[in-house]
Amino acid sequence: MATSKSLGTAQILDALRVITDPGSGKDFVSLGLVANIKVQAGKVSFDLYIPSHAQDHKDEIKRKAVDAVKNIEGVLAVFVNATLKPRPRVVHGQQAVPGVNHVIVVGSGKGGVGKSTSSVNLAFALKKLGYSVGLLDADIYGPSQATMLSKFLSLDAKPEVKENLLIPLDVEGVKTISMGFMIERDQPTVWRAPMATKMIQQFLLGVEWGELDFLIIDLPPGTGDIQLTLSQQSNISGAIVVTTPQKVAVEIARKGLLMFKHVGVPILGVLETMSGFACGDCGSMSAIFGEGGAKALSKEDNVPLLGQVPIDAALVRSCDEGYPIVLKDPQSASSKAYLQAAASIISQVEAQGVGSEQDVVPLAVESLPAVEGSSHRLAIFWSDGFKYTYNAKDLRFYCPCAVCVDEFSGKRRITPDSIAQDVSLEKALPVGRYGVNLVWTDKHTTGIYTYKYLRELDAEKVQERPNPPEESARLSQARS
């Protein structure tokens, strides 16, 4: 028999990998839900964090954990402190939307794939799992949430205005706002893109959202101005890409997925809708729209598959009636799929460390004047404790914008000689959660440098943190 001295943390963790999260299917060890393991004289104790969506299974999970560790040779007793997992919170930086901890966007490359249906049902699924939730309909030209929630709203329901803030409508505890609440039912929104993006800004920052765990944003189809505005002006915790199984839908969905990756938005996963037709009489499934599309996208792009939602008559009726299927028929196959996806989303937020101290972001940006024998420099202090110092002229030359780089060939349109020797930084502006807009003294203002790009460029690197009083003055909202 093994002695207690031979027992180690690795053995305990290996044994606990059999404990899986009922939401995501991932093991507790991979999700970081096991902590403070102690072994003494054959007695093992540890903390086990139970996600909010799994609290009904707390006793069962605890029992399985005890049994798993007891089976290790040399273990005489097991003590488990099973506590509720703290809800995911934004740890650093100011919240982009006051009071909202996590902004999650639901998008797709094309329309007609069930994106709005998924947005509303995921919002209510998260509410059912015990979270405070808001729902923002960002489709200015084709808003649909007013129709999808019509069971609970009167035809003349309009958001009130209080102290220059819109008050969202409350639908069964979910706060929601939509262009559909602001205009007549048949009135088209004939606006140019700048007006539409301005309305999105109003919905984000001009609405009294209150304290929310999650704000679900139902995006319009495509990868245009509204998507970019949201990515740049809100601290998005993650994106959900919706697709049907068809090849053409998957190929367009991939473009949306790559757009989110390009602007630094974490991908929480892919959700497949119309994943087979459920016969109302016999319950058999027919793959009328094909099969395997989302699974292939998930595998090829290395992102989670959140779930597969079948199409059934009850789901179609619930949409037409303005009564989300998650509320109307919680036992339906579609409802169960959305609840499973919602639980997986929570797990993905926690597993990815979204909003955690693991993210490396700039704390401060400082322009360093030229000294005798050298040119202007620029210093960026990063959250991992490093200071990167760049030659200002080199950094200006490597500007990634379309003015400086041909979008098709990738060749530089500028030369080192075309840049003034004394060019320096005028100001640094935060862009979403992924980059910084550097404005130079030569009046060049269109360069958005992603954090990843800045970390890859040549720089002098030393361990150094900015002085606390100066940090907020230099780039106080770089992480907003």
Image (spheres, helix red, strand yellow):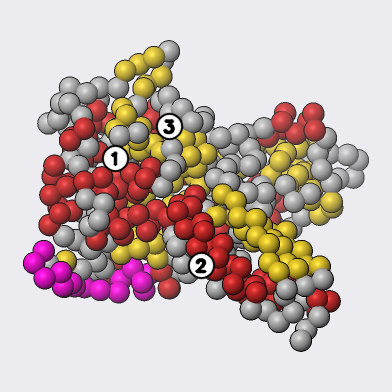
> Mark 2 to mark 3: distance in Å?
36 Å
Q: Which of the numbered marks, if any, corresponds to residue 139?
A: 1
The reply to whether residue 442 is in sight is no
The overriding secondary structure of the stretch rendered in magenta is loop
The reply to whether residue 87 is in sight is yes
Above-or-below relation of 152 to 279: above
Q: Nearer the viewer, residue 405 or 346?
A: 346
Amino acid at pointer 3: Leu
Range of the magenta residues?
280-297
Residue picked out by circle 2? 20
Above-or-below relation of 365 to 7: above
**Residue 348 as seen in the image, left or right of residue 200:** right
Q: Quadrant of residue 110?
A: bottom left
Task: Identify which residue is drawn at 55% across, 55% down.
Answer: 50
| Earlier sequence position, callout 2 versus callout 1 | 2
Task: Identify which residue is drawn at 74% across, 44% down.
Answer: 380
**SS label for mark 2:** loop
**Residue 216 as seen in the image, left or right of residue 220:** right
Residue picked out by circle 3? 204
Q: Nearer the viewer, mark 2 or mark 1?
A: 2
